[in-house]
Image (cartoon, grey):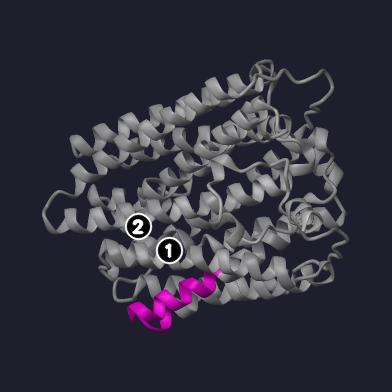
Amino acid sequence: MSKTDVTTKKHVRASFRDASYTSFNIGMAESYFAAFMLALGMSEVVAGVGTVIPQFIGVIFQLLSIRSFFTQYSLKKRIVLFLSLQALSFIPLIFAGVYKISSPYLIIGILGMYWASVLSLNPPWNRLMGHTVPGPFRLRFFSIRSQFSQFSVFLGLIGSGLVLYWAKDNGHELPIYVCIFVFGFFLKCMSIYEVKFNHNDYELAPGSEHRVRLRDFFKKIKGTEQGKLITFLFLFHITVHFSAPYFNPFMLGKLKFNYIEFMMITSLSYFGRVFMFRMLQKFAKSKDIEKILLLATFGVSTTPILWAISQNYWWIAGIEFLSGCYWAGFELSTILLYYQKIDDRERTSVITYITLLNTTGMFIGSLLGAGFMKILPSHWDSYLSLFAVSTLIRLTLIVFAPQINFRGQIPKMINFNRLLSVRPPFVALTKPFKEKSKNKKNKD
């Protein structure tokens, strides 16, 4: 009989089910928001900007979600509230598909509500997991959960891509989007059920969470290594999103890729991230983090010009796999670098402000990219010009990359074959694999 407390098992199993619902929804619905806007008849520029502006709206709302009006409630109540808002945001999307409402302001507003609830959910969810998952087993728990989630995203991408490919050829594209959003609504309701009935409620102890004011945050990082990195990332997000939001419209609108081709390219980018994460966790050392950041930044910077070299499907697919590899290195190195010194009590506020800066950079960059495409002469190829300029300004920024020394440890992930050998909802977290193997050897 397992020594794991029944309540802890219930939390763990519910968390894995919630991960599958959330991640499947990301691949199935969230990844196709820009494609949905194109299907409604909106322009490629609007579809590109429409994926970034809602995230900016969301991060502004996230600033409000860390104020006392929300933090006076328990963690579970806050999570249920934000999950409910996510579920409700699918209802107007369903009506937009049914009645073919193509107002950019309406769709962007709806997606803004969606992203507001997504981003506001993260801080209380992280704190709740800290309470429900025993400390010695958190790394192993999140390792299995994250890889299981990635697989669910992939399944969602494939499912929607195949169905939408059939639907477009048969003239049922918008009805299928309606079905996707209805399914997304029910997935969110299932997540609400898991949190509400399969997790304990936790009231945060007085003083356990300290809200840092925005002006104090800027004072605290001024002149520090962390501050230099945060400034660099803000500027880098501007240069990246000068062109990045317009890559999906470029594939679907200009290159006329079908949904299966779009799904495959998106999946290859995802596989590139997974592959590189595994390689970095296996071979990288703490002293290599700064080099990884510079190499990944250079790789991300050269991606747009590679899109412009050839419009062959297999060429773009290969570039997207490499892009996923570069982004994995970029994300791992930056997360390790600027989170290593954050006080746990201030983590919610500080991460919120960093997210605000990065999303603001995305917002500014996407608007600059849209303005650039609008002012180009009509005889110019707007996408190729955009990609060329984006590459130039990204490479220019690398000159100002900060010199930062990482002094932490790179977290280890469990082997992927161990994930495949168990059913995640029934993993006994309190019995590490190494302990099992030792017991077997002792018996022998």
Residue on which the image places disc 1: 267
In what element is the residue under mark 2?
Answer: helix
Residue 262 vs 361, above or below: the answer is below
Answer whether labels 1 and 2 touch (C-beta < 8 Å).
Answer: yes
Whole-number angstrom distance, CA of label 1 to CA of label 2 = 8 Å
Q: Position of residue 431 (x, y in %)?
A: 72, 44
Q: Residue at x 27, y 50 (%)?
A: 42
- Magenta span: 308-324
Residue 154 vs 330, above or below: the answer is above
Question: Is residue 51 within the magenta segment?
Answer: no
Q: Position of residue 322 (x, y in %)?
A: 53, 75
Question: Is residue 323 within the magenta segment?
Answer: yes
Does residue 15 appear to the left or right of 229 in the view shown? Answer: left
Q: What is the three-letter code of the residue carrying label 2?
A: Ile
* Closer to us: 135 or 358: 135
Does residue 313 appear to the left or right of 23 in the view shown? Answer: left
* Closer to us: 402 or 262: 262
Q: Earlier in the sequence, mark 1 or mark 2?
A: 2
Mark 2, residues whose alpha carbon is within 10 Å: few (<14), some, or many (≥20)?
A: many
Residue 89 vs 318, above or below: the answer is above
* Closer to us: 335 or 279: 279
Q: Position of residue 301 (x, y in %)?
A: 58, 73
Q: Residue at x 32, y 42 (%)?
A: 104
Q: Residue at x 56, y 56 (%)?
A: 421
Q: Residue furthest left?
A: 170
Is the magenta region chiefly helix, strand or loop? helix
Does residue 152 appear to the left or right of 421 in the view shown? Answer: left
Residue on which the image places disc 2: 158
Q: Position of residue 334 (x, y in %)?
A: 72, 59
Which of the 4 image quarters holds residue 298?
A: bottom right
